[in-house]
Image (cartoon, rainbow, N blue to C red):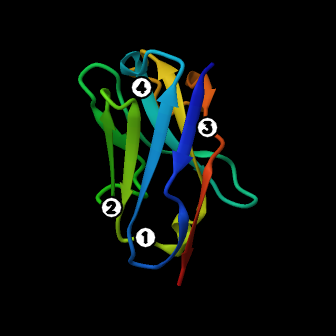
Amino acid sequence: QVQLVESGGGLVQAGDSLRLSCAASGFTFSSYTMGWFRQGIGKEREFVSAITWGISTAYYADSVKGRFTISRDNAQNTVYLQMNSLKPEDTAVYYCAAAYRTSNSYRNIRAYGYWGQGTPVTVSS
């Protein structure tokens, strides 16, 4: 049974940091590109960051570049998102997702076959 379980969300103030984790099970984690997406209230789900399978190349949305860092631990089947210098506009539910051997379509929601339940992040001003 495939599971993606996010954790680490919460309520913080602007400028604070959070570290999200996503624990995966039920599939060969190392063969999947892992992505983070977010969805604010009344907004569409958007790409935040991804780290590819294989050589673990990291990609970021322009809005988070320089503030967020994605990493993965294939031994622990876990992907992380370190979020620094948080802003109120980062407020959203953050979702972890997995895409099988995807290298070029990492921004495309439809490339991801497995999704977590999401963890909320609220940044107050």
The image quarter in which residue 17 lies: bottom left
Real-space Cα separation, disc 2 to disc 1, in angstroms: 8 Å
Real-space Cα separation, disc 3 to disc 1, in angstroms: 22 Å
User: How far from the left and from the top, in percent, is residue 83?
Assistant: 38, 60
- The residue at the point 55 percent across, 66 percent down is 10
The image quarter in which residue 6 lies: top right
Classed neighbour count for the residue bearing mark 1: other residues with Cα under 10 Å, few (<14), some (14–19), many (≥20): many
- The residue at the point 59 percent across, 29 percent down is 3
- The residue at the point 39 percent across, 75 percent down is 16
Q: Which mark is residue 38?
A: none
User: How far from the left and from the top, in percent, is residue 121?
Assistant: 56, 63
Residue designated by label 3: 116
**Image marks 2 and 1: residues in contact by CB distance under 8 Å:** yes
Real-space Cα separation, disc 4 to disc 1, in angstroms: 25 Å
Residue designated by label 2: 67
Q: Mark 3 falls on what kind of element?
A: loop
Residue designated by label 4: 33
Describe residue 51's horizontal placement relative to residue 24 as left or right.
Answer: left
**Image marks 4 and 3: residues in contact by CB distance under 8 Å:** no
Real-space Cα separation, disc 4 to disc 3, in angstroms: 14 Å
Amino acid at the residue labelled 2: Arg
The mark nearer the N terminus, 4 or 3, is 4
Q: Nearer the viewer, mark 3 or mark 2?
A: 3
Classed neighbour count for the residue bearing mark 3: other residues with Cα under 10 Å, few (<14), some (14–19), many (≥20): some
Which residue extends farthest left? 55
Classed neighbour count for the residue bearing mark 2: other residues with Cα under 10 Å, few (<14), some (14–19), many (≥20): few
Q: Nearer the viewer, mark 4 or mark 3?
A: 3
Amino acid at the residue labelled 3: Gly
Which residue extends farthest bottom? 125
Residue designated by label 1: 86
The mark nearer the N terminus, 3 or 1, is 1
